Image (tube, rainbow, N blue to C red):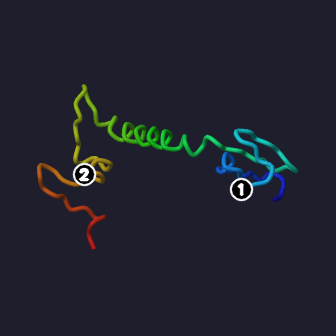
């Protein structure tokens, strides 16, 4: 590989897929960065859950006024997410043929 390339070896704890990687170490060999990411696979679910929670919080926070969720159905963001209203399925261009 040419200098400046990065290799992340996710299988380093089972012997690795790249010669020269070492578990939980970053090595630069001939200008190529070799990352032995032994802990990465086990950390992904935590990070994915945190990101999802942050995205949901960012979505609903603007609609919370005085501790109560108030949905302005004219708001573009709300109308794009709203699938039903008081038991009635709303028409949404995503579902139209």
Which residue ends up furthest to the left in the rendered image?
87
Note whether 96 is above or below 26 in the view shown.
below
Q: Is residue 85 left or right of residue 49?
A: left
Q: In the picture shown, does residue 17 fall above or below 25?
A: below
Describe residue 33's horizontal placement relative to residue 12 as left or right. Answer: right
Residue depicted at 16% across the width and 58% down the height: 89
Q: Residue furthest right?
A: 30
- Asked if 92 appears above or below 79 in the picture, the reply is below
Residue 82 in the image: x percent, y percent? 25, 51
Would you identify the image quadrant in which residue 28 lies? top right
Q: Nearer the viewer, residue 20 or 96?
A: 20
Residue 56: x %, y % from top left: 37, 41
Q: CA distance from mark 2 to mark 1?
A: 46 Å
Q: Nearer the viewer, residue 39 or 56?
A: 39
From the image, tell me which residue sits under label 1. Answer: 17
Residue drawn 29% across the image and 51% down it: 81
Residue neighbourhood size for the residue with mark 1, other residues' Cα within 10 Å, grouped as few (<14), some (14–19), many (≥20):
some
Residue sitting at the far top: 66
Quadrant in which the N terminus is drawn: bottom right
- Residue with the mark numbered 2: 82
Of the two numbered discs 2 and 1 in the rendering, the one whose residue sits closer to the viewer: 1
N-terminal-most mark, 2 or 1? 1
Q: Residue at x 27, y 66 (%)?
A: 95
What residue appears at the point 65 percent right and 43 percent down from the top-left corner?
A: 38
Q: Quadrant of the C terminus?
A: bottom left
Residues 51 and 39: in front is 39
| Crowding near the residue tagged with mark 2, few <14, some 14–19, many ≥20 C-alpha atoms within 10 Å | some
Which quadrant would residue 91 be assigned to in this image? Answer: bottom left
């Amino acid at each position: 590989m040419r200098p400046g390339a990065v290799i992340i070896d996710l299988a380093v704890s089972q012997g690795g897929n790249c010669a020269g990687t070492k578990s939980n170490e970053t090595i630069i060999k001939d200008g190529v960065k070799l990352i032995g990411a032994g802990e990465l696979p086990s950390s992904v679910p935590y990070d994915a859950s945190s990101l999802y929670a942050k995205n949901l919080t960012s979505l609903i926070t603007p609609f919370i006024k005085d501790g109560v969720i108030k949905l302005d159905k004219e708001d573009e963001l709300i109308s794009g997410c709203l699938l039903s209203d008081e038991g009635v399925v709303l028409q949404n261009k995503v579902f139209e043929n």
